[in-house]
């Protein structure tokens, strides 16, 4: 019986798990973050309704999740939170800093 990890390649041959985001990906990343934030906010607001917007049970959960995602995406598409430029600039700045350290 081999020891756990005995067949792994040496550390020098391993690649990093995630590459440093490129500046071209910054806008997409900022938009996806805004979509996620919007979906979370809609979900929390929907949770304040007394009987649930779509009723209870599995079908209500599915439709509620769908609503959260689509309203969150619509909010992000319209830049309703006015965060996209700030997030993009921050991601690009961190990306340049990580590349400079190489």
Image: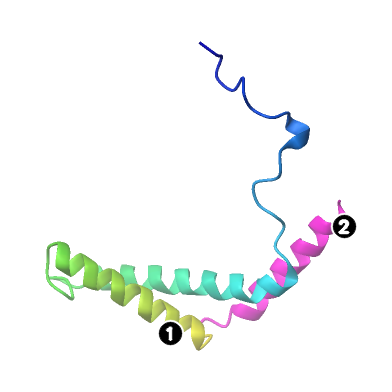
Q: Is residue 27 above or below residue 61?
A: below
Residue depicted at x 17% and y 69%: 60
Q: Is residue 40 above or below residue 79?
A: above
In terms of image quadrants, where is residue 28? bottom right
Return the x and y of residue 66 as percentages of the image width and height: 30, 73
Label 1 – label 2 distance at C-alpha: 36 Å
Return the x and y of residue 23 as percentages of the image width and height: 74, 71
| For residue 15, side relative to residue 80 (left or right) | right
CA neighbours of label 1 inside 10 A, class few (<14), some (14 to 19), many (20+): some
Magenta region includes residue 22: no
Any part of residue 25 in sight = yes
Mark 2 highlights which residue? 100
**Magenta extent:** 81-102
In terms of image quadrants, where is residue 91? bottom right
Mark 1 highlights which residue? 74
Residues marked 1 and 2 touching at CB (< 8 Å): no
Q: Which of the pair 10/48 is nearer the observer?
A: 10
Secondary structure beneath disc 1? Answer: helix
Residue depicted at x 51% and y 74%: 34
Q: Is residue 85 above or below residue 41?
A: below
Mark positioned earlier in the residue sequence (1 or 2): 1
Q: Which of the pair 68/13 is nearer the observer?
A: 13
């Amino acid at each position: 019986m081999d020891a756990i990890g005995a067949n792994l390649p040496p550390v020098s041959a391993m690649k990093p798990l995630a590459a440093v985001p490129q500046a071209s990906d910054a806008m997409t990343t900022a938009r996806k973050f805004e979509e996620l934030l919007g979906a979370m906010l809609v979900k929390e607001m929907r949770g304040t309704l007394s009987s649930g917007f779509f009723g209870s049970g599995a079908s209500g959960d599915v439709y509620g999740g769908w609503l959260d995602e689509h309203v969150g995406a619509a909010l992000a598409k319209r830049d309703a939170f006015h965060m996209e430029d700030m997030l993009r600039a921050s991601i690009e700045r961190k990306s340049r800093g990580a590349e400079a350290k190489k």
